[in-house]
Image (cartoon, rainbow, N blue to C red):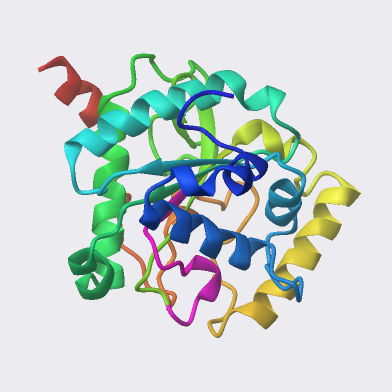
Amino acid sequence: MVKGIYTKSFLERNQAEFPEWQRIAFELLAETVADDADTFPCIPGRQAFLTDQLRIAFAGDPRENGTVEELALLLAEYGNISRDTGKYTSLVVLFDTPEDLAEHYSIEAYEELFWSFLNRLSEQDEKEWPADMPADPEHYKWEFCFNGEPYFILCATPAHDARRSRSFPYFMITFQPRWVFENLNDSTAFGRNMSRLIRSRLQAYDQAPIHPHLGWYGGKDNREWKQYFLRDDESQVSKCPFSYLKNMFNKMK
C-alpha cells in the first residue's frame, strides 16, 4: 500500500496513529457510506468501502498551494495502483477544513475553491492529457485527467444541506477512474439497472430534486464538468471554470 493512500481496514486498525481531525473525518465517512440503514445512494461506492476497494487519503487545507502539491503526488501514485484495487475503486480525499472554512464558506465559495483547486492541481501534472481526450469541457467526451488517467470527480462540502448526497463535514473530493464505468453505462442492462437504483435512492436521500445535469458519459447532451460540483438548487455557473490549455500555459511560464 502506498504511503498516504489507505484502505478502510488499515485505518480501522491504526486510527490511534492519526491526528484527531483525520480520525473524526474517517469515522464520519464510514457512518455516511456504510450507514446501518443502507441508504447511501451510490451503491458502487458503498460496495467499494465495505470490500476494501476504496482508497482514502488525507490532505491539508485546500486553499494552500502546498496541499495541491501534496495531492498531485498522491493522485499520480493512485493512478499507478488503481487497477489493482478492485472494479469499484475510487480515491476519496478528505481535506483539513479549519473552522473559518467549515462555518463561513457558502456553497458558491466552495464551488470557486473546488475549481481553483482543480486548476492548480492540473498545473502540477507532469504528463500531457491523453491524445484522444478533448481539451474543451463543452465536448461530450471531456473528462478531467491527471497523470494520463481520466477521472470523474465528485465534491462534497459542509455548506450543502438539501443535497445531502453532496454534504460532508469536511471538504471532500472523490476521484473515480473512468475505466470503472466500462460496465456502468447505458449500453449495458447492468448499468441501466444500477442507474435506476441510484436515482431511486437519491430521491429518498436528498431534499433537493435529482439534478437535471446528471447523465451518462459520452452522451451527446452530457457535460461531465456540470456534474462535478452540484449546488443545493439547480443553478450553475454558465461556463466551466476549468481550462486545461490555460493551465498548461501557466505551467510553462
In the rendered image of this protein, does residue 84 appear above or below residue 99?
above
The x and y percentages for residue 239 are 30, 53
Which residue does the image show at 62% across and 48% down from the upper left?
Answer: 12
The x and y percentages for residue 190 are 87, 50
- Quadrant location, the N terminus: top right
Which residue does the image show at 54% across and 24% down from the upper left?
Answer: 79
Which residue does the image show at 38% across and 61% down from the upper left?
Answer: 170
In the rendered image of this protein, does residue 182 appear above or below residue 161?
above
- Front residue of 121 and 171: 171
Residue 146 in view of the camera: no
- Quadrant location, the C terminus: top left
In the rendered image of this protein, does residue 233 appear above or below residue 48?
below
Residue segment shown in magenta: 161-173
Residue 166 in view of the camera: yes
Q: Residue furthest front?
A: 16
Q: Residue 80 occupies which quadrant of the picture?
A: top right
Q: Residue 159 occupies which quadrant of the picture?
A: bottom left
- Examine the residues drawn in magenta and state their main secondary structure: loop
- Front residue of 88 and 233: 88
Which residue does the image show at 57% across and 44% down from the upper left?
Answer: 11
> How many tags in the picture?
0
The x and y percentages for residue 228 are 46, 53
Q: Is residue 164 magenta?
A: yes
The x and y percentages for residue 227 are 49, 56
Q: Is residue 76 magenta?
A: no
In the rendered image of this protein, does residue 226 appear above or below residue 199?
above
